[in-house]
Amino acid sequence: MILILIGFLSGIISGMGIGGGTILIPSLVLFNNIKQQDAQGVNLIVFLPVAIIALYTHYKKGNIDFSFAKLIIIGGIIGAIFGSILAIRINPLSLRKYFGIFLLLIGCYELFKKKE
């Protein structure tokens, strides 16, 4: 039951464009004792159908600027290759700490950024 709840919350956040991995990965590691690399792999598998549905919804609403999307896709593919190679080579405990620091920094940024 907890996996369904984790997936549900992750799906909601993914649909908003925030990134469901911020919920999914820590939840899998903390509540299910899964290695960080395995949780990231699960996140990638879960990401595909969720992203397709979110992409379709945002496309229908006209929320996608394809001139930006092309450049981000190219950078994302290159970054994914390097990031996945790096993630496999890093100690799972260290990777878990780095991911936690990353989430903390993103949280601080969101907390203190100027309102638009």
Image (cartoon, grey):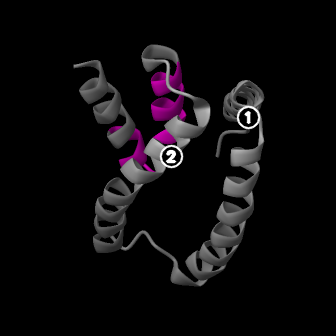
Could you tell me the amino acid type at mark 2?
Answer: Gly
Residue 70 vs residue 100: left or right?
left
Could you tell me the amino acid type at mark 1?
Answer: Phe
For the point 76% across and 45% down, which residue is it? 89
Q: What is the quadrant of residue 84 in the picture?
A: bottom right
Q: Main secondary structure of the magenta part?
A: helix
Q: Position of residue 68 (x, y in %)?
A: 61, 77
In the rendered structure, find residue 73 and report the number of the disc placed on it: none
Membership of 106 in magenta stretch = no
**Whether residue 79 is situated above or below residue 74 in the rendered picture:** above
Residue 48 vs residue 94: left or right?
left
Residue 34 vs residue 59: left or right?
right
Structural crowding at the residue carrying mark 1, measured as other residues with C-alpha within 10 Å and reported as few (<14), some (14–19) or many (≥20): few
Q: Nearer the viewer, residue 109 or 104?
A: 104
Q: In this rendering, which labeled residue sits more in front, label 2 or label 1?
A: 2
Q: Nearer the viewer, residue 21 or 60?
A: 21
Q: Nearer the viewer, residue 87 or 48?
A: 87
Q: Position of residue 113 (x, y in %)?
A: 73, 37
For the point 66% across and 79% down, which residue is it? 71
**Whether residue 108 is situated above or below residue 67 in the rendered picture:** above
Q: Disc 2 marks which residue? A: 41
Gap in Å between the C-alphas at discs 2 and 1?
Answer: 18 Å
In contact (CB < 8 Å): disc 2 and disc 1: no
Q: Position of residue 39 (x, y in %)?
A: 51, 36
Q: Which residues are magenta?
A: 12-29
| Label 1 element class | helix
Membership of 18 in magenta stretch = yes
Q: Disc 1 marks which residue? A: 102
Residue 115 vs residue 49: left or right?
right
